[in-house]
Amino acid sequence: MPDPSNAAAPHKFTRYQSFVVYMLAFLQFAVIVDFMILSPLGAILIGDLHISTAQFGMVVSAYAFSAGIAGLLTAGFADRFDRKKLLLFFFTGFIVGTLLCGMATSYEFLLFARIFTGLFGGVIGSVSFAIIADLFPMNVRGQVMGTVQTSFSAAQVLGIPIGLILSNHWGWHMPFFAIAGIGAVVGIFVFVKLRPIDAHLKHQTNKHPLKHLWATASKPRYLVGFASTILLATGGFMLMPFGSAFSVNNLGISLDNLPVVYVSTGLCSMIAGPYLGRLSDRIGKFPLFVIGTLSCMAMVLWFTRLGITPLWVVVTINILLFITINARMVSASALASGGPELRDRGAYMSINSSIQQISGGVAAWIAGTIVYQATPHAPLEHYPMLGIVVATAMLITLPLMWNVNRMVEDSPAGTPAQQGH
């Protein structure tokens, strides 16, 4: 554990390190906005393309499942290339896929475009986390993760509202064109400014990619990390799909006030993310994970039992809930990055990302079987039961993450492969 006296203040990154952190944060932002923007565009898309709600659901889920499959397909090759080249390859594919989404004029075209985008976009996160683990030591990795993961909040606060404004003025195609255009400009900066990240290649063997994938996926010391990822994905993906419906139909929040809840929550999460990252470096990743998990369990059990509630109370609870979720995810991501050995890092992150995507899809499906709504405007039933399931999953992650923490402490994997200066 780092000296608390040194960890109290934010670590001063070099100009290049700061560029890497903010570049990765933007790439995550672009991918998340592309994924999240589809849901609020649903009402427009269903009418414009003359598709059913079931077909729209297929368009949404196609991305997640193709992203999960892509991670597994890539895992065996992920440690055989310079991570810069790998990042540029997948980000270029993501831009092309997003451009295809903007060009879609039929359900079949859009479904193909979402599958194509997921195949490339779903791998960017795992490559980004491998880069972070390669360039930054464990004692500042929480600060880096805290900054990069503010992209989730930024997507909620900036990306979705701007996307909706663009779609209202120029049609639902425009948000995708905007993401592709801005992404292409940032991709050029990455190509020019990002240095090769290839120290891991010195540790490679001639093992066949499929054998490398299997060796990484079946290594006993990694299995506990994969198991914790499954349960970490459960909480968010179980609550998120029904969050707005619960707020409107159970808590009594009007549709006009719903953006207030999301924007205020996202803004506070953006501010809290870097501070939580630095706190994890100061007090330790696992202690922060424990604090975040126990607090989050309490918030979930409270939130899912609420009835008609004043707006300011709902906003406050949502802010606290998402801050505790951020505390869990920032500390868990930092811990996960320290688990794999250098020669396995890319494969491990790819498998981990795939598990997260697929587990999230399964969790959302399970949540749909628990929650019941008699009519489109009726209150959601069995939501407290959903809260119990989510809280139980969070509780089980504690011993799993304790084992991950012990693995990290006994492993040299927290040392960066090469320093960015």
Image (spheres, helix red, strand yellow):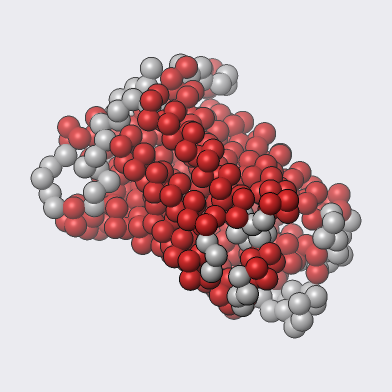
Please tell me which residue lies in front, 185 or 156: 185
Name the residue rendered at 12%, 49% in the picture.
Answer: 207
Quadrant into which the C terminus falls: top left
Please tell me which residue lies in front, 309 or 206: 206
Name the residue rendered at 17%, 32% in the picture.
Answer: 202
Q: Position of residue 216 (x, y in %)?
A: 25, 52
Instruction: Tell whether 42 sits left or right of 252.
Output: left
Q: Is residue 100 above or below residue 276?
A: below
Q: Which residue is most to the right?
A: 310
Q: Position of residue 297 (x, y in %)?
A: 64, 56
Quadrant into which the N terminus falls: top left
Q: Position of residue 255 (x, y in %)?
A: 82, 60
Q: Position of residue 217 (x, y in %)?
A: 27, 56
Q: Is residue 18 above or below residue 335?
A: above
Please tell me which residue lies in front, 6 or 180: 180
Name the residue rendered at 41%, 59% in the picture.
Answer: 116
Report which quarter residue 39 is drawn in.
bottom right
Report which quarter residue 368 is drawn in.
bottom right
Name the residue rendered at 38%, 25% in the picture.
Answer: 192
Let me know if residue 182 appears in the view: yes
